[in-house]
Amino acid sequence: MVDVVTARVRALPPVTGVGSALDVLAELMPLDALRRAELEVNIALVAEGAAEPALLPVRDDAHAGIAALCRAVVSTLAGEDADPDGRRARRLHALVDGLSLQLLHAGPEGGTDWAVLVLREELEAIAASADGPG
């Protein structure tokens, strides 16, 4: 599952602005049935990691990959030196994770547009921080 998601993200054009960052990060969120199933598998890995230590590297690699992607997005949108302590990237990662859980709990009938809008607003705020103190 991690390899499939990684390949899907890598197949997208590189992040150059808010739109492309949104496209990349949206691949991590349960916006359709396939991505919903992937998130459910990921949650199972997190839940079972304590009981099955062999799952921990898979879980940790997935988490590290998302963290690296969020750092790259912040660096691209706000500037290479805009997040020296990694706080913005961690906040973006937490937002993607939180929105994903909210979407999963809401179910397919809950719609997804609201979550995409929240993510877009955060990415726009990160990009705007490159224009002034932030």
Image (cartoon, helix red, strand yellow):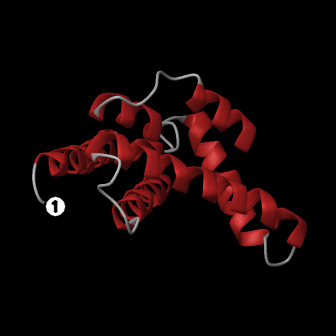
Q: Reply above or below: 132 against 108.
A: below
Name the residue carrying label 1. 134
Q: Quadrant of residue 95?
A: bottom left
10, 132: nearer the viewer: 132
Residue lying furthest front: 81
Nearest the camera: 31 or 106? 31
Furthest toward the left, the residue is: 132
Q: Left of 107 or right of it: where is 74?
A: left
Q: Is residue 133 above or below residue 108?
A: below
Task: State left or right for residue 107 relative to residue 1.
Answer: left
Point out residue 100 in the picture as x, y percentages from the top left corner. 47, 53
Would residue 111 be visible to someone looking at this image? no
Relative to 25, 54 lies left or right:
right
Q: Quadrant of residue 57?
A: bottom right
Residue 120 lies, with reference to residue 41, above or below; the image says above
63 left or right, relative to 128: right
Q: Position of residue 38 (x, y in %)?
A: 65, 45
Quadrant (top left/top right/bottom left/bottom right) for the N terminus: top right
User: Which quarter shows the C terminus?
Assistant: bottom left
Residue visible at 51% across and 36% down in the picture:
27
Q: Quadrant of residue 89?
A: bottom left
Residue in view at x 64 percent, y 37 percent: 5
* Front one among 92 and 118: 92
Within 10 angstroms of label 1, few (less than 14), some, or many (20 or more) residues?
few
- Which residue is located at x 49 percent, y 45 percent? 29
> What type is the residue that disc 1 sits on?
Gly
Where residue 49 appears, as percent x and y from the top left, is 78, 71
Could you tell me which residue is drawn at 45 percent across and 52 percent down? 71
* Any part of residue 95 in sight: yes
Element under disc 1: loop
